[in-house]
DNA sequence: CGCATAGTTAACTAAGTCGTTAACTATGTA
DNA sequence: TACATAGTTAACGACTTAGTTAACTATGCG
């Protein structure tokens, strides 16, 4: 039930893969182009791309010798939602805490240390 | 420069660790309590907690024999921002695409296949 | 054909992850 | 002291990850 989040988060856990995703925001690119910024062999990039593809974060269209890669926008949604949820929970809690502290201050004007 | 995102995302990549984070939204809990829901040994949970702690996602206070664990709210921010940024980029692009398609439809009323 | 380009697959190494059980430390309690 | 509870550390095995180089497939071009 959680496999999608597993693969998405672990795909995002590698800096080269995040960089590739960022790179692809500028538009489609083929494998060699994507490989250029890194001091990394082509096979290494090839497998990073396969990981991203496996996570559904990118897709490719083979055109002759060229593999044109592009972002798949929806793929990051589940992970984004999870984190947003986690954070929203906390802002909610902190709001409650703020209210609580506020109330404390109002109730006993003064000396509450620590 | 990217190490924080690396550790955060890979900490989130394991279902047990995400579950622990979710569990901790209900409040602080000690290690044995956190271990209960999983068919997993205590040492296994102990290391999951260490991973979460290493990523800064949780913190603990040792009180006698009990290690009381709690969420650290700010820790998920960088990762959340990265994903939100990634997604915002795409909604922007899709808006542009919608506009573009809209314009195409207006310009040549009909038959654009593929 | 012969050769270059784009990219993948294979084989290997080094290191990391994730689980186990067994043994340990530390605290509380009779 | 002796014993139970809370939790960590150590040692191990199975598996995965991330990189390398070498060899391969497939396309394009003279």
Image (cartoon, coloured by chain):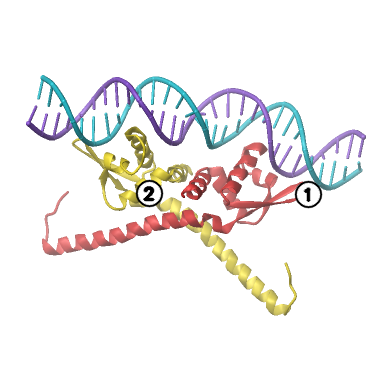
Chain colours: A yellow, B red, C cyan, D purple
Q: Is residue A106 above or below residue B32?
A: below
Residue in the picture at 45% in, 55% down: A81
Calculate the distance from the C-alpha at mark 2 to the C-alpha at mark 1: 45 Å
Disc 2 secondary structure class: helix
What residue is shown at x 56% (from left), y 43% (from top)? B16
> Which is nearer the eye, B112 or A39?
A39
**Where in the figure is residue D9, as x and y percent of width and height?**
68, 36
- Measured as percent of width and height from the top left, residue D13 is found at 58, 23
On residue A47, the disc is none
Residue density around tag 1, few if under 14, some if 14–19, many if 20 or more, within 10 Å: few
Along the line of sight, which residue is nearer the eye, A89 or B93? B93
Residue B107 lies left or right of residue C23; in this view the side is left
With respect to residue A105, does B27 lie above or below? above
Under circle 1, the secondary element is loop
Would residue A93 be found to the left or right of residue D1 on screen?
Answer: left
Pointer 2 chain: A
Which label number is shown at residue B64? 1
Query: Dividing the picture into quarters, in which one does residue D22 lie?
Result: top left
* Residue matched to label 2: A75
Q: Residues within 10 Å of mark 2 (few under 14, many from 20)?
A: some
Question: Residue drawn 47% across and 43% down?
Answer: A6
Q: Chain of mark 1?
A: B
Quarter of the view holding residue A43: top left
Foreground mark, 2 or 1?
Answer: 1
- Where residue D23 sits, quadrant-wise, is top left
């Amino acid at each position: 039930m959680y496999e999608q989040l597993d693969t998405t988060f672990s795909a995002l856990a590698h800096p080269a893969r995040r960089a590739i995703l960022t790179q692809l925001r500028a538009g489609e690119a083929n494998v060699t182009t994507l490989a250029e910024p890194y001091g990394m062999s082509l096979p290494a990039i090839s497998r990073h791309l396969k990981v991203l593809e496996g996570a559904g974060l990118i897709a490719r269209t083979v055109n002759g010798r060229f593999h044109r890669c592009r972002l798949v926008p929806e793929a990051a949604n589940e992970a984004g939602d999870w984190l947003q949820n986690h954070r929203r929970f906390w802002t909610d809690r902190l709001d409650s805490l703020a209210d609580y502290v506020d109330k404390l201050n109002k109730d006993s004007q003064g000396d509450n240390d620590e």
